[in-house]
Image: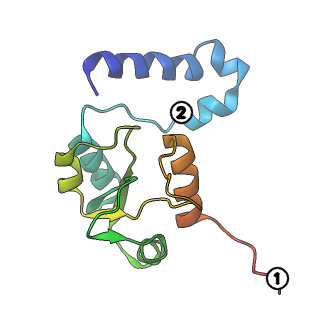
Amino acid sequence: PTRALRSLARELSQHWLEGFGATYNPNRGEALGIVSIVSDIEDVLLDVEQRTKTRAKLVVTSAQPGKDSISYQSFRARLHTSTDSHVLLFGTGWGLADEIMDRAELRLEPVYGPGEYNHLSVRGAAAIIFDRLRGQHAPQKE
């Protein structure tokens, strides 16, 4: 993000951590308390590696299928067995830049629905993907 966007992110975070928002909605402040604002993806990967003492792998999402996309089921299993850390990066409505897609070690398959349209808001896509990767589902009833 640009310097201006990082500044805006700090200002918004501070509102929920120390400003009126901290008393208005303490839960939001608690959630934002773990947020770090950094300059670029490399800073994120380095931070994760320093905190976890493991190698951080960049995993990207896209509405477009890729030749080497990994299924949610396969990646979920990998999360349970891998000793590496994983940084899951979501793009915007325009997707991620090609250089970021090329730099990633893994690319998740798109979120498919009942039709051909699969362009979701980042919030919607993130909720679906997190549920597929980490959700605890009740056993199927017969």
Give the SS element for disc 2.
Answer: helix
Residue 39 versus residue 74 in the image, above or below: above
- Name the quadrant containing residue 84: bottom left
Q: Residue at x 23, y 52 (%)?
A: 101
The numbered mark, 2 or 1, whose residue comes first in the sequence reads 2
Q: Amino acid at mark 2?
A: Leu
Q: Residue at x 23, y 42 (%)?
A: 97
Viewer-proximal residue among 114 and 81:
114
Residue 52: image location, x then y, percent:
35, 58
Query: What residue would you read off at disc 1?
Result: 141
Viewer-proximal residue among 120 and 107:
120
Viewer-proximal residue among 125 and 117:
117
Q: Which residue appears farthest toward the bottom when viewing the image?
A: 142
Residue 91 versus residue 110 in the image, above or below: above
Q: Quadrant of the N terminus?
A: top left
Q: How many marks?
A: 2
Query: What residue would you read off at disc 2?
Result: 32
Viewer-proximal residue among 76 and 95:
95
Q: Which residue appears farthest toward the top when viewing the image?
A: 20
Separation of marks 2 and 1 at Cα, in angstroms:
38 Å
Give the SS element for disc 1.
Answer: loop
Badge nearest the viewer, 2 or 1: 1
Residue 141: image location, x then y, percent:
82, 82
The chosen color scheme is rainbow
Residue 70 vs residue 32: left or right? left
Q: Residue at x 75, y 74 (%)?
A: 138
Q: Amino acid at mark 1?
A: Lys
Residue 103 versus residue 76 in the image, above or below: above
- Name the quadrant containing residue 135: bottom right
Residue 106: image location, x then y, percent:
29, 64
